[in-house]
Image (cartoon, rainbow, N blue to C red):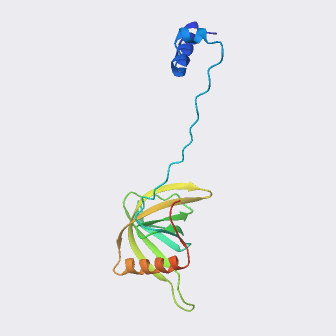
């Protein structure tokens, strides 16, 4: 059922949006010209403080849950000196401080991987394909671990693995 008041309000709104008053619309027999379309691509600026690196290093997140310590394992997706994103099978999100155990692969055959211990804060968790992607911000490194990470990332950069937002 049509409502004439609503129909009139719609017509009046269209005239206002088109910039025509009632008299101009009645005088104009031609349909109004479409509004010009402007397309401008704004430059994206990288606001990150650190370069990011694509890696597939093993890691674990440890935190105090309801019934004691909880541990989740996954893989690093990308990393910087300020934090990382990981892929994990579980929807893990904890508002308190978590401990990240990060396994740096050995640089030489026959040597062991180095495990870094970093206190972190979870910034986000989202479902990405069939895994959850979790963003962690580094808060505090165990003594000497930040330097080890920095050196390893510099080595990764030498291989052309660093990237920035484009």
Give me the residue at 45% from left, 80% from top: 115
Percent x, y of residue 12: 53, 13
Give me the residue at 52% from left, 54% from top: 126
Give me the residue at 52% from left, 78% from top: 156
The relative height of residue 28 versus residue 38 in the rendered view (above or below) is above
Percent x, y of residue 121: 39, 62
Percent x, y of residue 19: 52, 19
Image quadrant where residue 147 sits:
bottom left
* Apparent side of residue 49 relative to residue 4 in the rendered image (left or right): left
Residue at the far bottom in the pictured view: 110
The relative height of residue 40 versus residue 21 in the rendered view (above or below) is below
Query: Between residues 72 and 112, which one lies in front from this camera angle?
Result: 112
Q: How many marks?
A: 0
Query: Between residues 46 and 147, which one lies in front from this camera angle?
Result: 46
* Apparent side of residue 63 relative to residue 72 in the rendered image (left or right): left
The relative height of residue 2 versus residue 59 in the rendered view (above or below) is above
Image quadrant where residue 30 sits:
top right
Percent x, y of residue 65: 41, 62
Image quadrant where residue 88 sits:
bottom right
Query: Between residues 25 and 85, which one lies in front from this camera angle?
Result: 25
Position of the N terminus, as image quadrant, is top right
Give me the residue at 55% from left, 21% from top: 18
């Amino acid at each position: 059922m049509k409502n004439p008041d609503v129909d009139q309000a719609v017509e009046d709104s269209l005239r206002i949006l088109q910039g025509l008053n009632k008299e101009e619309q009645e005088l104009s027999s031609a349909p109004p010209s479409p509004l010009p379309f402007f397309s401008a691509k704004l430059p994206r600026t990288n606001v990150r403080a650190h370069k990011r690196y694509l890696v597939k290093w093993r890691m674990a997140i440890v935190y105090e849950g309801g019934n004691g310590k909880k541990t989740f394992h996954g893989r690093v997706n990308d990393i910087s000196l300020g934090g990382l994103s990981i892929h994990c099978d579980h929807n893990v999100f904890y508002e308190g401080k978590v401990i990240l155990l990060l396994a740096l692969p050995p640089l030489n055959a026959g040597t062991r991987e180095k495990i870094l211990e970093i206190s972190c804060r979870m910034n986000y968790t989202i479902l990405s394909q069939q895994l959850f992607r979790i963003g962690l911000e580094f808060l505090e490194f165990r003594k000497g671990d930040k330097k080890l990470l920095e050196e390893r990332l510099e080595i990764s950069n030498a291989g052309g693995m660093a990237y920035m937002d484009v």
